[in-house]
Amino acid sequence: MKREDFLIKYADVSVDIYHRLLDKSLAVSPAVDFADGKAVVSFKSENALPMNGLYVMLDKCSSPQRIVRIGTHEPTSPNGLLPRVFNHFVSSKNRSILRKHIGSSLLIGNTKKLNKWLQKKEKGDVATENAVTAYMQEHIRITFLPVDDIKALAELEKYLISAVAVATVTDPELIAARAEWLGNNCDEPTVAEYGIWNDDHVKWHPKDDSELKKMIRTVEKYIL
């Protein structure tokens, strides 16, 4: 199979994974919304908040609601899923790449503040950090995908980020849904190009049919 034809096939697989992932996240996972510094948890099933696994961030203000970030915790930090999620909302841009990306998007057009924000050694200014938190509280809902095998998390994260990214730039409905998305202004080109708040793994693709089949088996075993 020619590489061009294989990438078309992978795009179709990615769109399928995306919609199955979204449906599962909305149907069976506990969801967390943050407001006024507090987390509000809603349950649509008997599932408790998992301690190990992946999180799926949804932009609840887009139409349709869409996936905008996939993440997990370090395999060396068992039971670290919830602390990782909370860290994005209550820490700073130097401890959360998500916050850094959102801040750079908010500061577009303000070159002086943006340049300072992007410097690793510089502490984020209070006004921008507060604006990032406010944006996240308004837009982000989090659902969870429990995975007890923490050794599988890194590979699963890679597969799902890639699939969501490819689907976001392939599916016409998702392309339209991101038209007014804040991340289109992000200083990180990968975020702006692919329409999600991730920059790692978005450009990964399986190299051949064998690797694609492995990806599908792994995702279906642990997630779908």
Image (cartoon, grey):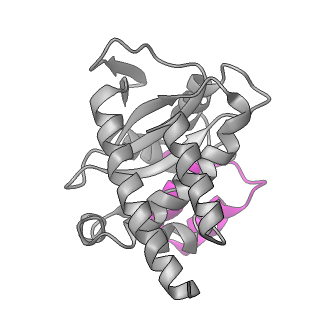
Quarter-of-image position of residue 148: top right
| Magenta segment main secondary structure | helix
Nearest the eye: 80 or 152 = 152
Nearest the eye: 208 or 179 = 208
Residue 34 is covered by the magenta coloring: no
Task: Where is residue 220? Give x, y as percent.
Answer: 49, 42
Relative height, residue 210 to residue 189 (above, below): above
Q: Residue at x 72, y 21 (%)?
A: 78
Q: Residue at x 48, y 74 (%)?
A: 193
Task: Where is residue 127? Give x, y as percent.
Answer: 49, 47
Q: Which residues are magenta?
A: 98-127
Taking the image as shown, residue 150 lies to the left or right of residue 132, namely: right
Task: Where is residue 49? Give x, y as percent.
Answer: 46, 17
Nearest the eye: 124 or 194 = 194
In this rendering, the count of numbered labels is 0
Relative height, residue 149 to residue 214 (above, below): above
Quarter-of-image position of residue 174: bottom left
Which residue is outermost to the left? 63
Quarter-of-image position of residue 86: top right
Relative height, residue 121 to residue 89 (above, below): below
Quick one: quadrant of the C terminus? top left
Relative height, residue 89 to residue 17 (above, below): above
Q: Residue at x 51, y 46 (%)?
A: 70
Task: Where is residue 92? Give x, y as percent.
Answer: 62, 41
Residue 119 is covered by the magenta coloring: yes
Quick one: quadrant of the N terminus? bottom right
Could you tell me if residue 96 is visible in this image? yes
Could you tell me if residue 129 is visible in this image? no
